[in-house]
C-alpha cells in the first residue's frame, strides 16, 4: 500500500535576480534601488512558501489507518474465497484419482477434462481477485489524496501561501527548513474532521 499510498507534489523553483552595475554614480544608485526591490520580492516569495511532510501526514492521518484496516479485511475475505475454491478443486482431484481405475476410458477423459477446465477457472479467479484488490487500493488512495489536497486548499484560504510543497524521504528535496513545516496544522484539521465524521456514524 505504501507504494500505491505515496504522493509527490510539484516543486517550485525560485528565480535569482542578478544586478549589473556600472562605474557611473547614477547607475550605481539605480543598482542599489533595484537591489532593495529584489530583496523585498525575494523575502516575500520565501515567506509565501510552506511544505508538508507527506510521509508523516499519511501515516498519522486516522482516515488512512481506517482505509488500511478496510483493505486488509477485504484482502483476507478474497483470500478465503480463493482458498476455498482451491480446496474444493483439490478434493475433486483426489476423488478422481481414487475412482480413476474403475472408470471407463470415456468417463475418465470426461472427468479429467472437467478438472482441467476448473483449474483454468481457479487461475482466472486468482487474477480477477488480485485485480479487484488492486482497484480497491487505488480507489482508497485516491480518496485519501483528495481529502488531503482539499484540506490543504481550505487551509491556504486563510494562510495565503503561494506554494505548499510535498516533502518526503523519496522526494528530490534534500533539506527543508522546519519553520516552513505546516504538517501538524494540516494533520490536526484532517483528524478533527475525521473524528467528527466518525462520531456521526
Image (cartoon, rainbow, N blue to C red):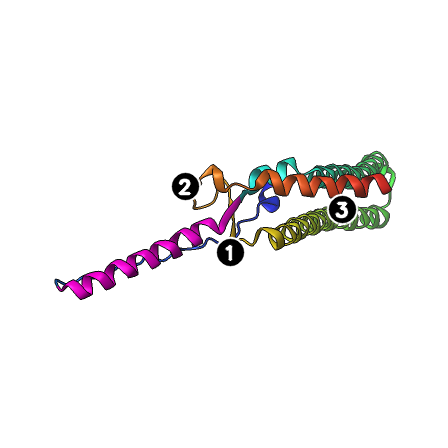
What is the spatial separation of the Cα atoms under label 2 and label 1, in whole angstroms? 21 Å
Q: Residue at x 39, y 57 (%)?
A: 41
| Quarter of the figure with residue 81 | top right
Q: Residue at x 82, y 38 (%)?
A: 84
Prevailing secondary structure class for the magenta stretch in the rendered image: helix
Q: Which residue is mark 2?
A: 174
Q: Quadrant of the C terminus?
A: top right
Q: Which mark is residue 122?
A: 3
Locate residue 172 relative to residue 90 in the image: left or right.
left
Q: Secondary structure at mark 2?
A: loop
The residue stretch that appears in magenta: 24-51
What is the spatial separation of the Cα atoms under label 3 and label 1, in whole angstroms? 54 Å
Q: Secondary structure at mark 1?
A: loop
Residue 138 at what x, y percent from top left?
A: 67, 50
Residue 51 at what x, y percent from top left?
A: 52, 45
Q: Is residue 169 visible?
A: no
Locate residue 181 relative to residue 74 in the image: left or right.
left
Q: Earlier in the sequence, mark 3 or mark 1?
A: 3
Q: Which mark is residue 162?
A: 1
Q: Earlier in the sequence, mark 2 or mark 1?
A: 1
Amino acid at each position: 500500500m505504501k507504494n500505491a499510498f505515496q504522493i509527490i507534489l510539484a516543486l517550485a523553483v525560485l528565480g535569482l535576480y542578478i544586478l549589473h552595475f556600472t562605474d557611473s554614480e547614477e547607475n550605481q544608485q539605480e543598482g542599489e534601488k533595484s537591489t532593495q526591490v529584489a530583496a523585498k520580492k525575494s523575502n516575500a516569495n520565501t515567506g509565501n512558501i510552506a511544505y508538508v511532510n507527506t510521509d508523516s501526514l499519511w501515516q498519522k492521518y486516522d482516515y488512512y489507518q481506517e482505509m488500511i484496516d478496510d483493505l486488509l479485511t477485504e484482502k483476507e475475505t478474497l483470500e478465503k474465497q480463493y482458498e476455498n475454491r482451491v480446496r474444493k478443486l483439490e478434493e475433486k482431484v483426489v476423488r478422481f484419482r481414487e475412482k480413476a481405475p474403475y472408470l471407463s476410458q470415456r468417463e475418465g477423459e470426461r472427468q479429467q477434462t472437467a478438472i482441467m477446465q476448473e483449474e483454468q477457472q481457479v487461475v482466472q479467479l486468482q487474477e480477477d481477485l488480485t485485480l479487484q484488490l488492486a482497484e480497491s487500493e487505488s480507489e482508497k488512495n485516491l480518496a485519501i489524496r483528495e481529502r488531503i489536497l482539499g484540506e490543504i486548499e481550505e487551509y491556504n484560504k486563510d494562510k495565503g501561501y503561494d506554494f505548499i510543497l510535498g516533502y518526503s524521504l523519496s522526494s528530490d528535496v534534500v533539506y527543508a527548513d522546519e519553520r516552513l513545516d505546516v504538517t501538524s496544522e494540516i494533520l490536526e484539521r484532517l483528524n478533527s474532521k475525521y473524528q467528527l465524521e466518525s462520531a456521526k456514524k
